Image (spheres, helix red, strand yellow):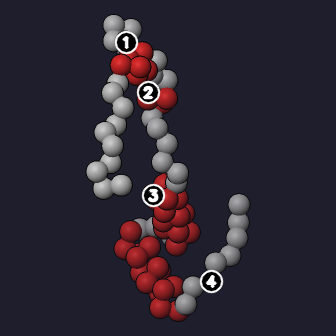
């Protein structure tokens, strides 16, 4: 996909220098910066191992004991 971006002169010059120092062209630096930004701002997701976890057969599910829980104490500040 191609598109244009517009930078002020100072930012453009800094980008050119940084790309030269990295031995890359400006487009490569911009692609990497956008990819890294997207990775940091992506919706966090649970790892596949967590999503696929089915429990441990030897341990009863927490919900199995829910009826044995005592109700919360009355809130003394209410």
Q: What residue do we see at 41% from left, 81% from top?
A: 17
* Quadrant of the frame with the C terminus: bottom left
Question: What residue does disc 1 label?
Answer: 60
Q: Position of residue 75 (x, y in %)?
A: 32, 48
Quadrant assignment, res 55: top left
Residue nearest the viewer, comparing 76 with 35 = 76
For residue 49, which numbered disc appears in the image?
Answer: 2
Local secondary structure at mark 3: helix
Q: Residues within 10 Å of mark 3 (few under 14, many from 20)?
A: few
CA gap between label 4 and label 3 equals 23 Å
Question: What residue does disc 4 label?
Answer: 6
Q: Is residue 28 visible?
A: no
CA gap between label 1 and label 2 equals 20 Å
Question: Cβ–Cβ below 8 Å for labels 2 and 3?
Answer: no
Residue nearest the viewer, comparing 26 with 61 = 61
Instruction: Report whether 58 appears left or right of 24.
Output: left
Q: Position of residue 39 (x, y in %)?
A: 48, 55
Among numbered discs 2 and 4, the one appearing first in the sequence: 4
Question: What residue does disc 3 label?
Answer: 40
Among numbered discs 1 and 4, the one appearing first in the sequence: 4
């Amino acid at each position: 996909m191609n598109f244009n971006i517009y930078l002020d002169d100072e930012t453009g010059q800094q980008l050119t220098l940084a790309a030269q120092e990295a031995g890359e062209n400006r487009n490569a630096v911009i692609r990497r910066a956008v990819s890294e930004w997207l990775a940091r701002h992506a919706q966090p997701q649970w790892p596949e191992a967590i999503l696929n976890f089915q429990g441990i057969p030897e341990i009863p599910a927490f919900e199995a004991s829910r009826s044995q829980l005592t109700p919360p104490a009355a809130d003394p500040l209410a």
